[in-house]
Amino acid sequence: MMTDFSIYEVGPRDGLQSADTITPTHHKVEMIERISNVGITDIEVGAMVNPDKVPNMADSALVYTQVSHLKQNHNLGMLVPNKVGVDRAKRVGVNKFNVFFSPSDYFNINNFGRTLSSIFTNYCTALEGIPKKDVRVYVSTAFGCPIVGDVPKDAMARAMEWADTLGSTFVLCDTVGKANPTLITDTVRRIDADAELALHLHHGLRKNRMFDNLSAGFDNGVTQFDSSIGGMGGCPFIPGSGGNLATEELLLWGQKENLDCGVSLEDIGALSKYVESTIKAI
């Protein structure tokens, strides 16, 4: 079925990873299955990261094995920070890999302890033999760095060139929550690569501009948007970045613009109530 845009649901990973309490494995599995049942086919189910640093993702391998039956009709992504993460993911049958880095080396060093060139070299080794079509590249701080401010154009160009080496989908992340329609338009139009573009948006301090940001992305060819059911998650390390775009909001924007994504507001409403009463209540 042809649709105007698609949802990439990040609630099970980005929505839960920084939660104050640990979400039980069986609730994560149930949430993923419920997400799949409403017609969302692209889901980020977890992250193969250091369990001591991100305890809510410590069971990602187990979660994946329990939802892997969905792979027949769904793309189940796993966030991987390095070769160790890729190897762990492979062992449980993951075949869709999400990698991440920033064009800002200040951000990379503060968050990963390594420069972009080091991160890129590690990913080249880790992803050897994995088709580019199975790799989604998150480009953090695409619309500004919390440390240096505006990202230099040459740094962004280098990051996109290296992203093009690794994967076939680039996710431009509004890490600091300061994206606006003009910035989104300028950034998207500067990208010279044969790749699908996606947006990962945070609310920032001006929550009323989200629909304008979505429209700016769509008007410039972006047809995939990250969202998190119930607006869970965000970037807790950057004050003012705000929460994730909620899946419910994304659907409301689509309805306002007369755009279809194959998912109904009615079904999302039931899913949202489940998340509010079961997941957020933990």
Image (spheres, rainbow, N blue to C red):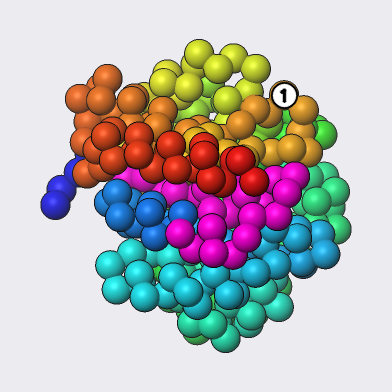
Answer left or right for 21 relative to 160.
right
Q: Position of residue 108 (x, y in %)?
A: 78, 51
Q: Residues within 10 Å of mark 1 (few under 14, many from 20)?
A: some
Q: Is residue 32 magenta?
A: no
Give whichever of 9, 280 is nearer the camera.
Answer: 280
Magenta range: 5-30
Q: Is residue 72 above or below residue 241?
A: below
Residue 164: x %, y % from top left:
50, 60
Residue appearing at x 59%, y 74% in the figure: 61
User: Residue 95 at what x, y percent from top left?
Assistant: 45, 75
Observer able to see residue 163? no
Residue 261's image quarter?
top left
Where's residue 152, x and y in %? 69, 36
* Nearest the eye: 277 or 130: 277
Hey, what amino acid is under mark 1?
Gly
The residue drawn where x is 50% and y is 77% is: 65
- Disc 1 is placed on an element classified as loop
